[in-house]
Image (cartoon, grey):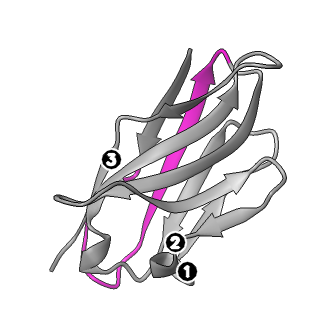
Amino acid sequence: QVQLVESGGGLVQPGGSLRLSCAASGSIFSINAMGWYRQAPGKERELVASANAGGATNYADSVKGRFTISKINGAQSVHLQMNNLKPEDTAVYYCNTRTYVTPTNWGDYWGPGTQVTVSS
């Protein structure tokens, strides 16, 4: 029904930057929210940042001041600018969207994930 395609992951040195992008397609009536989660080896998946249709954003404490999520109203895409990356940011990053496929039916959809590795 809804597909998410992520791009922008890779290997970067500590202090470096990466920009993740995610585009949604499929049977989309309206997008309620889009965001990014991450999962490091041996850890649970956690919210990194999200943005809702009203423009409100939410960040994990560990990334505040370093990461910026951007979602243009009406666009079916979201970006995550990650600056001053640290080794502890190493994880698989997943794009997520809460999307209405009809005026009353919604679901949570996930991308396949993109690896971010921060290492010297």
User: Which amino acid lies under the numbered mark 3 shown in the image of this protein?
Assistant: Thr
Residue 30 relative to residue 16: left or right = right
Res. 72 in view: yes
Residue 101 picture location, percent across and down? 70, 18
Q: CA distance from mark 2 to mark 1?
A: 6 Å
> Few, some or many C-alpha atoms within 10 Å of disc 1 (few <14, some 14-19, many ≥20)?
few
Res. 10 in view: no
Residue 13 forms part of the magenta stretch = yes
For marks 3 and 1, give the one nearer the viewer: 1
Secondary structure at badge 1 equals: loop
Residue beneath the point at 77% across and 21% down: 29
Image quadrant of residue 87? bottom left
> Few, some or many C-alpha atoms within 10 Å of disc 3 (few <14, some 14-19, many ≥20)?
many
Residue 1 picture location, percent across and down? 56, 14
User: Which amino acid lies under the numbered mark 2 shown in the image of this protein?
Assistant: Ala
Q: Main secondary structure of the magenta part?
A: strand
User: Which amino acid lies under the numbered mark 1 shown in the image of this protein?
Assistant: Lys
Q: Which mark is residue 114?
A: 3
Residue bearing the label numbered 1:
64
Q: Earlier in the sequence, mark 2 or mark 3?
A: 2
Secondary structure at badge 3 equals: strand
Point out the stretch of residues depicted in magenta: 8-27
Q: Which mark is residue 60?
A: 2
Of 62 and 119, the residue lying toward us: 62
Residue beneath the point at 56% across and 36% down: 23
Residue beneath the point at 55% across and 80% down: 64
Q: Quadrant of the C terminus?
A: bottom left
